[in-house]
Amino acid sequence: MLSTSQSAIDFEQAKKIIPGGVNSPVRAFKSVGGTPRFIAKAHGAYIEDVDGNRYIDYVGSWGPMILGHSHPDVLKGIQDTAQSGVSFGAPCELEIALAQQVIAMVPSIEVIRFVNSGTEATMSALRLARGFTGRDKFIKFEGGYHGHADGFLVKAGSGASTFGEPDSAGVPNDYAKLTLTAPFNDLDAVKRLFAENPGEIACIIVEPVPGNTGVMLLNENGFLQALRDLCDAEGALLIFDEVMCGFRVAAGGAQARFGITPDLTCLGKIIGGGLPVGAYGGREDIMRKISPDGPVYQAGTLSGNPLAMRAGLETLKHLQNPAIYADLETKSKRLFEGLLAGCQEAGVAASGNRVGSMFTIFFTQLDQVTCCSDVSNHCDLAFFGKFFNAMLEEGIYLAPSQYEAAFVSAAHSDADIDATLEAAKRALATLTA
Ligand code: HOZ
């Protein structure tokens, strides 16, 4: 058994003064059991806890660390920039540089606004869609997670699903009524919502590669294109929440990978290189409605923070090299298929979904997991918890919830993938003995 005594001490202390001992719920390991590891440092593909245990990390700070932890260029960029000050509350040239870089890489973005988190990005994009269309209702998907602003915490994924509270307390009923939901991959349900709410729906917001109810596949059956067509027919906007999959599944995000153009895109995670950041952008005529150009208000003291801009720039500089994505694809495919093969050899029923370097293995009898209720009703969540803890004991750090994705980084070596597959074999053997 790994010694986790210092993490346990830290957790007890944190619980006294921080809800659940954590500043974001899934980190508390509540649905999988065990002691959350307090992390002391992270380099490349590895994180190390306060007890000195090293893990091969497939969380990657929940997505941002596509180059691996502590990439030397990102660190140097942050250090150099910090010499000139860490926040100005006034415009700086790094904002222009990152804006130009994102616009050059993401097909649909003509104008962009930086904020401080993915939650801010989605919240602001929704307000903009409402302001632009003059409509109040919107459609999201069951198990879709778009941060924690009130209107999105209706049938929400990620921690909300993990803890069985997809509809958060504290969200006013009158407000939640404006949020319409449909299952992933159910086009008829989306059409019904438009039919039942004629001229009232401002937008559809969707993660084009959902990663917050586990990874789901939406493009394979034409679902995303059908959403695009429906929005056009109904005068609604299509918002791609690419906070997780932006720059993850391709240099230009899912929209570049699939060739589908949203009206607005939300970004975060990777564009901050691991520092807190978010952004929303899209068609110029829509984006010009934002204050001070237009009447839709949104602001932020730390928005366009120079350190985050620089960390993002250094990260995107590397992501312009297509070899990175080719390598991520190869490694991720081998890991994903190897894990599924390992389950099959061990007699453990499993299936999975993968797009590029993000994937989820589901413990289920289903051949294919296509929507949130498949996860809630047809996946063995108790077995997931056991597998998660067995892998942790083997030195493999996975997301502590079946409703999340695994992320492979450029820093993961072939040896890391081999070690992970061997660890999974041992873990599965122990669990099925
Ligand atoms: N809920 C986010 C991932 N789906 C972030 C979780 C965290 O940072 O703990």
Image (cartoon, rainbow, N blue to C red):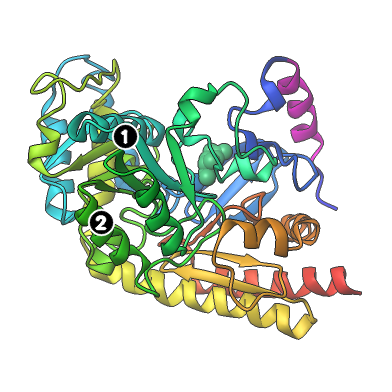
Based on the displayed image, in which of its 4 quarters is residue 81 positioned?
A: top left
The answer to whether 415 appears left or right of 421 in the picture is: left
Judge whether residue 21 is colored magenta.
no
- Tag of residue 318: 2
The residue drawn where x is 34% and y is 47% is 204
The three-letter code of the residue at mark 1 reads Leu
The three-letter code of the residue at mark 2 reads His
Proximity of marks 2 and 1: CB atoms separated by less than 8 Å: no
Q: Mark 2 or 1, which is nearer the eye?
A: 1
Q: Quadrant of the C terminus?
A: bottom right
Where is residue 17 drawn, in percent x and y?
70, 15
The residue drawn where x is 40% and y is 62% is 410
- Tag of residue 126: 1
Based on the displayed image, in which of its 4 quarters is residue 173 positioned?
A: top right
Dot 1 lies on which element?
A: helix
- The answer to whether residue 273 is above or below residue 171 is below
Q: Residues within 10 Å of mark 2 (few under 14, many from 20)?
A: some
Where is residue 324 drawn, in percent x and y?
31, 67
In the image, the segment drawn in magenta is 4-16
- The answer to whether residue 336 is above or below residue 400 is below
The residue drawn where x is 60% and y is 35% is 167
The residue drawn where x is 25% and y is 53% is 231
Dot 2 lies on which element?
A: helix
| Secondary structure, magenta segment, majority class | helix
